[in-house]
Amino acid sequence: MNRKLVKLFLSENLLDNLPSAEISEKAACKAVDPELFFSEDDHEILKAKEICFGCPVRSLCLEYGLKVANDGILGGLTAKERMALVKTQPVDADLVNEAISIRRDIETMHLGDFAGKYGIHVRTVSRWKNKLQDRGMAA
């Protein structure tokens, strides 16, 4: 990863395409094998959807799925069902994965280590971390 990608992480609102912390904490599926939500078996698809329909953060998950995910069941809908609801293409999943990795690094690494890894000034990292904290996306 390079500095350009880290700038993209914040400058082009890629943060808006990350799953919220609330989804990770409260999702009904968090204790379920994730493979269930990527199955092509009709019985397993129905089982995954049942879990979604009883989930307290279903609407947040669906909102995330409409913006980002290209496959799997999110918010009770398959990728094909979600795509029928939107006319635009979702954000590139690889970029979202990179953004998740950057977010994890900025939360867990010492500011100086993060700055060194990504070739950014420590003040910039501090400013970005504050931005994440303001949005409730970092501790």
Image (cartoon, grey):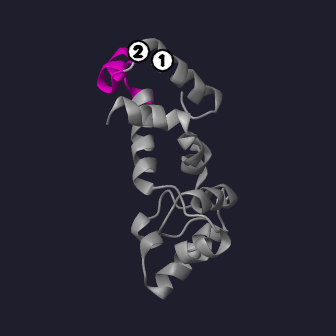
Q: Is residue 100 above or below residue 126?
A: below
Q: Position of residue 14 (x, y in %)?
A: 53, 43
Q: Residues within 10 Å of mark 2 (few under 14, many from 20)?
A: few
Please tell me the numbered disc located at residue 121: 2
Cα separation, mark 1 vs mark 2, equals: 5 Å
Circle 2: element type:
loop
**Magenta-highlighted residues:** 107-119
Please state if 40 lies on the left or on the right of 27 as rendered. Answer: left
Q: Position of residue 55 (x, y in %)?
A: 64, 62
Please tell me the numbered disc located at residue 124: 1
Q: Position of residue 74 (x, y in %)?
A: 56, 65
Please state if 76 lies on the left or on the right of 43 as rendered. Answer: right
Amino acid type for the residue under numbered disc 1: Thr
Q: Is residue 117 above or below residue 45?
A: above
- Quick check: can you spot residue 58? yes
Residue 55 falls within the magenta-colored stretch: no
Q: Are marks 1 and 2 in contact (CB under 8 Å)?
A: yes
